[in-house]
Every structure is written in structure tokens, then in C-alpha cells.
Amino acid sequence: MPPKEPPRRRVPGPARPRGAAAGSGRPRPAARRPSAAPRGRAPHRPPARPLRLGSPRPRLRLVSLALTLVMLAFVVRLLQVQAVDASAYAAKAEKNRYLEYTIAAERGEITDRSGIALATSVDAYDITADPKMFTPEDSGAPDAPQQAAALLAPILGADADDLARKLSKPKSRYVVLARRQTPQVWKQIKDLKSVFAEKARKGGANGTAGVNVLAGVFQETTSKRVYPNGDLAAGILGYVNAEGEGAGGLESQLDKELAGQDGKIKYAQSGGRRVPTAGTKEVPAVAGSDIELTIDRDIQWAAQKAISDQVKESKADRGYVIVQNSRTGEVLAMANAPGFDPNDLSQADAASLGNAALQDVYEPGSTSKVMSMAAVLEEGAATPGTHVTVPNRLHRGDRLFKDDIDHATWYLTLNGVLAKSSNIGTILATGQLGRTQAESNKILYSYLRKFGIGRPTGLNYPGETPGILAKPQDWSTSQQYTIPFGQGLSLNAVQAASVYSTIANGGVRVAPTLVRGTRGADGRFTPAAAPGQNRVVSKKTAKSLARMLESVVGDEEGTGTKARIPGYRVAGKTGTANRVDPIRGGYHGYTASFAGFAPADNPQITVYCAIQNPTRGSYFGGQICGPIYKQVMEFALKTLQTPPSGSKSARLPVSFQPGE
């Protein structure tokens, strides 16, 4: 049988107050609670009050308000970015995403008259970097600039500290570390980058941080100027600076034509890499024009070797040789010694960087006498056979004049005065140009100017000197008598050569030229403008002068016998002038020279040589410049295949017997 449930104990509830009816709305007075519970019963405890929660509505309102404010801030910022400042942010994003580089135009070549390159350009690289990629955040290395600089310095031949400074510019996204490096240099850097990239990849695969400190190094394709023939014609060509701009010689004078027009390229990048799918904007570069010179490379080589050897042998300060086409005025060679190699200017002497043949100004000496004789003949003051009695000394003004050697009284023809290079005879001859000395001075001055003395040659070469020729009213007492024999006026070597080309060309001066024309990027050749011309003396006078100059070389009494060339009639003149020393400020040493043309019966080539301050051996022009003239002239005649003279020279008398 199931057990019976124990009888439930009834727990008495609170006593209902007496007199209170059930359901009454009016409470009755409560009975007094006993002070202690009866024994055996548990004390009575009132039931716990239920927990009452606060209303959630205020909290919800507060959270909603906060969310609304946050969303409102986002909306305002979004409107600012996408509407108000949209263009500014787009430009900033564009700037950070896109890189723009200049595409260097290929510099035009400079060639000789046969198209042989004298100056050209080869592929090269500018080594660049993105400094932001060398920051600790981007590179993962706190000293990335220093590490990269230490690796690059020996390859670029640069200072490591300088490279580190360039790489430590986090606000910059572009810096040039080195310009115009050879492909071999970039290959070394590229190989190093590959090694570090591989190490960084393996390090990342092993769970360690991989670092490539060369990841931010890049290259830009450009070109480098080179001179295939080394120092050959360096004085004419000049050189370019580190920026690739012409800084001397024809490189500077014709820089606009040679340089062309640079282009631009713009492309998207990410992490230093080009994004090929983002598109590219490119303005192609326009190559510079090629310049064809009048120079003949072989003749230039012969002239440069001859003058270099003699300057070294004579221990002279410098020397120059000019070879010119007598008819056209084209300069076939313009050699300077000492010279320089434009491929390596760091080894060049600053004093040799220019073109001394056009930039040196000096007194020519007796080679200038041909202009005095031209004036005398043209004005009808004398003929080649006119008798001139030349004493040992001649007193004029405040000076006593003499010839290079002491001699008894010479009885010379005007031809003999030139052949024996008599200063006294020249003074006496030019004194017959006018009724007074002042008038003679004016007439002589007018001829010197027509020959091109005291004015630019027409080459427009940078730093060219026009020479010095004072106006006749400003000639000092001594200058009135020294200028006729080549002291007291000054010129450059090209001017001196042009004088003899004028005589060779029948008395017509053709302005010298160095440029034959240009060839544009389209391959079209444009000839240079025709040079200016002016008649200086008549054809008859020029022919008489040519015969007189033959006596200088061909006659045994002449001073230019060392310039003779077998098979060719040679016209020439020696010169030995006191030299103005620019450092000491007075005359010191000599300028030796020789000028002439050949064949004398049909002139084709003019050669002029000058050596400044020879200090060993002879200092006479006929002795040290005559052989150079012969050597260079022989080479030029053979190179240009000039036929030998077809007739022998009709020698003019040099002297006369008193009483004839």
C-alpha cells in the first residue's frame, strides 16, 4: 500500500482583524504582533519584494542619439570628400599613384665632312630612388638608407654619406642618385637587387621578416655623350656638362639644335612597380639634329699630331694649326696643343679646355706684312720690283728700328723686302701710301679692316676674340711704324689663316665656316647658309702677292725654305714676334709662326701655324713652324688628291745692285 501522506500542517496566516469583513475596502486596525513566536514554531518572515527594473527608454534614446551623431559625422565627411573637396583629393591620389618622368631626347651627332662621328651618344641610365620606400615602415629596416648607400657607393663611385642623405627624404618620392651611368653599372645594381629580393622572399617563407633594402632603387633610360676619337678636335667640339647640356665649343653654340625636345611619360605605380593595366600617357621625345662639320678627320689628326709634337719639343706654352679651303673658306682642321679629352674632364687642365685658336689674342709679327704689301701694291705706291734701300737702323718717331739680324745696307726689291722679312723695308714701303704719315696710317688701317682684323671671323664661336686694332688716330708714335710689320695689333689664328686664304682666292675674302649643314630627325639635310664675301684687293694684286710669297719659300735668300714641298709650288711667310706675357704684363718670349698656301699656281689649301713662347731650341717661325707647315700641307694635298703644280715658279728678283 502506498504510504499515506502526512497530514499537511496548516500555517496560520496573519490574523484578520476583528470586525473586518471579507472583501471590505476599509482596513481594520491590525492586531498587535506577539513579541515572540510560540515554542516549536519557525519565526514568521515576510516575503521578499520583487526586483523592479528601470525603464529602458532613456537609454535607448541616448544610444540612438550617439549613433545618429556618428552617422551624421560620417555623412558630413563623405560629402566633404566626394563633393566639396573631391577634386583636391582626386589630385592628391593621382599624385601618389602616378609617376611622371622626363624622356630625354637623343642628342644629335657631330660628324666630320665625310659623316664620321666626332661626338655621339650611347645608351646610359640615370639611377633613381623612391625615398619613401626606405622608411622603416616601408622597408622594414630602421637603417635602410645607410645600408643601401653602403652597397651603392662603390658601384656608383659616390660618397656613401651623400647617398644616404638623398635616400633619407621620406616626403620625396623621387631622387636622382647618379646620372648617365653605363649599362654595366645598372646591371651590377640589378643583380644586387635580385639577390636581396631572393633573400627577402626566403626570409618571409621561414616566418622571419624579409628585408630588401634595394627595392626602392630604379633606373631611367637616357644617353651619355661620348667622343670616339678622344682628344681629336676637342677644342672645336667642346663638351657637355653633368646635365647633358652643351657647356663648351660647338656643343654649347649649337646646343639647341643638338639637344632636340624631351618627352614625358606618366604611368600608375604601386609599391614601386609599374601597373601595366592602368594605362600610360606618353609624349615622345624628338631627337636632336646631326651637325656635319667642314672638318676632315684625317687632316685634323695630322695637324693635331704635328703641333702637339712641336709644342712638346720646344717646351712651348701652346700652339695651333689651321687648315682652310682657300676657295670656300671651309675650315678643314683647327688643332690646339695641349688639348684635353672631353670623355674625362676630371683629368683636363682648366687652361686647355677652350679653343685657343679662336680665343687667344696675340701680335702676329711678320706674317702680317702681307697685308701691308697688299695695301702698297693695290694703292700703286710700289711694284714687286721697286727698289728699296734698307739701312741697318732706321730712326722714326721716338724709336730706332732694326731687323731681326744686323746687316750692312741691303739693296732689296719690294719682293726682297718680303722675302727677307725686313721690318725697316716694310716701314719705308708703307710710308709711301700717303702724302703724310697720318694719311698712310688711315690707308693701311682700312686694308687691315677689310682683311678682317679687329672684327669677328664670322664663326660666332663661344669666347672668340675679334683681336685688337686701334683706330689710326689713336696709334701711338711707335705704333705708326710697328703695325706695318705686325707689332701693335693683335688677332687670332683663324683670322691669320683667313688673310692668306684671301690672297689665294684672288683677293676675295670668304668668311671662315665650320658647319656644312644639319640633318634633322626626318633625315633631311639642310646646308648651312653661304658665308659672306668681300673683295679686299684686285685679282692682279693677289696674283703679284702670291708670286712674292713664293720667293719667301723658293728663293735661297728667303726665310721659309724649310716649307718647300717637292712637286708643288708653295707660297708662304714666316713670322717671329715679341710676345706679350699676360702674367708679367710686358713683352717676354716670342710667337713663332708660318702661313701660306699651295699649290701657288692654283691655290687650294691654306695652312697657318703658330707656337707661343718656345723655350727650347729655335724660336724663329721659319725654323720651327716651317716644318709643321710642310708636314701638314703635304698630308692635306695627298688626302684631297690635289695634283702637283703644272709649271715652275717665275722667280722675282730679291735684290738689286746700286746704280742699276
Image: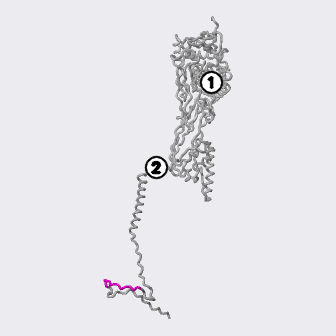
For label 2, the SS is helix
Residue 103 position (above or below residue 114): below
Magenta part mainly helix, strand or loop?
Answer: loop
Instruction: Let me know if residue 118 appears in the view.
Output: yes
Q: Colour scheme of this structure image?
A: one colour
Q: How crowded is mark 1: few (under 14 residues within 10 Å), some or many (20 or more)?
A: many
**Eyeballing the image, is 191 above or below 504?**
below
Residues under numbered marks 2 and 1 in contact, where contact means CB atoms less than 8 Å apart = no
The dot on residue 91 is 2
The answer to which image quadrant residue 500 occupies is: top right
- The image position of residue 555, as x and y in percent, is 66, 15
Q: Residue 363 carries which label?
A: none
**Residue underneath mark 1:** 612
Magenta region: which residues? 24-35
Residue at (53, 23) in percent of width and height = 455
Kind of residue sitting beneath label 1: Gln
Residue 335 horizontal/vertical position (percent): 62, 28
In the rendered structure, does residue 635 fall within the stretch colored magenta?
A: no
Quadrant of the image containing the C terminus: top right
Q: Classify mark 2: residues with Cα within 10 Å, few (<14), some (14-19) or many (20+).
A: few
Q: Distance between the residues labelled 2 and 1?
A: 64 Å
Q: What element carries label 1?
A: strand
Of residues 228 and 475, the one drawn nearer to the viewer in this rendering: 475
- Tell me if 649 is positioned left or right of 286 in this view: right
The residue lying toward the viewer, choosing from 586 and 89, is 586
**How many numbered discs?**
2
**Horizontal and vertical percent for residue 478?**
56, 15
Q: Is residue 193 above or below residue 370?
A: below
